[in-house]
Image: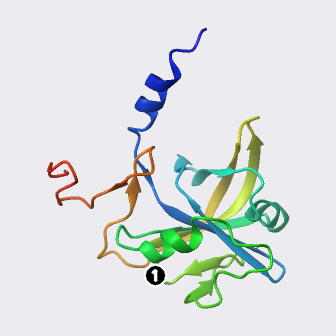
Amino acid sequence: MSRENGSTIDAALRQIPSGLFVLTTRHNDVRSGVLARWVQPCSLHPPLVMVAIAQGLPVEPLMRDSRAFALCQISADDALLRRLFASPPDRDEDPFVSLPSRTAPSGSPIIERALSYLDCELMRHVDLDTCYRLYVGEVMHGELIHSDQAPAVVLGNNELMPPSGTNGANGVTTP
């Protein structure tokens, strides 16, 4: 099967919305986190989620060694978390030092200002021979922390979508 023009495929893929999360993990005394925008549930029984993470990030060996990670959902208004976790911290930096957080049962950091969190046991990782790896986690714990805020949702081109019920850049009210 031959592939169509890449630009038309890219344009169509950019229309798929996804949530914005900070993936956190901890192994021994090292904590780390990175912005994750490709997160999807993939099973209800047992509850599983999958997340795509760029290869070579410092969180990868921590996740594999600890066999755990957490996903902290970001508010649409939270520019601080988007900026803090947009690029991975150095291996010697702890991005949670000045950020109010607690520890999930798995040991992963939970960001207190997150809308919700899912604490996951790493079930599998899949190397796709691309620049990303898929990680599948079984959700062991979770909590809705702040239900009064709208979650950050992005399109494939990293454009932040306006919260539901507000006017977007194109003047159209979102459903």
- The residue furthest top is 1
Q: In the rendered image of this protein, does residue 65 appear above or below residue 53?
A: below
What residue is drawn where x is 50% and y is 17%? 5
Q: In the rendered image of this protein, does residue 72 appear above or below residue 6?
A: below
- Percent position of residue 132, x then y: 69, 44
Residue 92 in which image quadrant: bottom right
Residue 46 in view, yes or no: no
- Coloring scheme of the render? rainbow
Residue of label 1: 113
Quadrant including the N terminus? top right
Name the residue type under label 1: Arg
What residue is drawn where x is 80% and y is 67%? 62
Residue 62 in view, yes or no: yes
Residue 168 placement, left or right of 117: left
- Percent position of residue 103, x then y: 65, 84
Q: Nearer the viewer, residue 62 or 139?
A: 62
- Percent position of residue 167, x then y: 16, 57
- Percent position of residue 39, x then y: 54, 52
What residue is drawn where x is 52% and y is 49%? 40
Q: Nearer the viewer, residue 90 or 137?
A: 90
Residue 67 placement, left or right of 4: right
Within 10 Å of disc 1 (Cα), the crowding (few <14, some 14-19, many 20+) is: some
Q: In the rendered image of this protein, does residue 114 appear above or below residue 153?
A: below
Q: In the rendered image of this protein, does residue 92 appear above or below residue 71?
A: below
Residue 110 in which image quadrant: bottom right
